[in-house]
Image: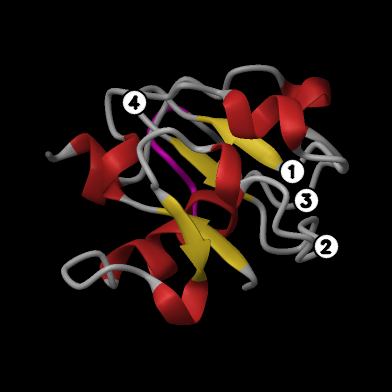
Amino acid sequence: MPYVIASPCIDTMDRSCVEECPVDCIYEGERKLYINPKECIDCGACEPVCPVEAISQDRRVADGDEAHVEDNRAFFTEVLDGRDEPLGAPGGAHKTGEIGVDTPLVAGL
């Protein structure tokens, strides 16, 4: 997984990264944004525009945010509350719109 969005995004969701992403791989949960690891092309365009520095490469997440690497993946591979199946890789966030639910890690904070 090239890039992940960690805890500084929770309840902030500035969305500057969404506008910058050339492949539309940043999806919106209820309280946080998530980068689809199967759709991200590892370009890094999202990282410098995040005003709260929530985005990093998966191997460079801030201390204390390591759980967000797996959590970011889980947003797409696990069945989330109120959904019948995993989100998977639908081919762009504009196709799905706001997902409106978060992973258990984020929802529980």
SS at mark 3 in the image: loop
On the rendered structure, is 62 left or right of 87?
A: left
Residue 31, labelled with which disc? 4
- Among numbered discs 2 and 3, the one appearing first in the sequence: 2
Farthest residue toward the left? 109
Q: CA distance from mark 4 to mark 1?
A: 17 Å
Residue type indicated by callout 4: Arg
Residue type indicated by callout 3: Ala
Query: Start and end of the magenta stretch?
Result: 78-82
The residue beneath circle 1 is 25
- Closer to the camera in the image, 80 or 94: 94
Residue name at image x 80 percent, y 22 percent: 94
On the rendered structure, is 102 left or right of 18?
A: left
- Closer to the camera in the image, 85 or 55: 55
Residue neighbourhood size for the residue with mark 4, other residues' Cα within 10 Å, grouped as few (<14), some (14–19), many (≥20) = some
On the rendered structure, is 61 left or right of 39?
A: left
SS at mark 4 in the image: loop
Q: Within the image, what quadrant is residue 9 found in?
A: top left
The residue beneath circle 3 is 89
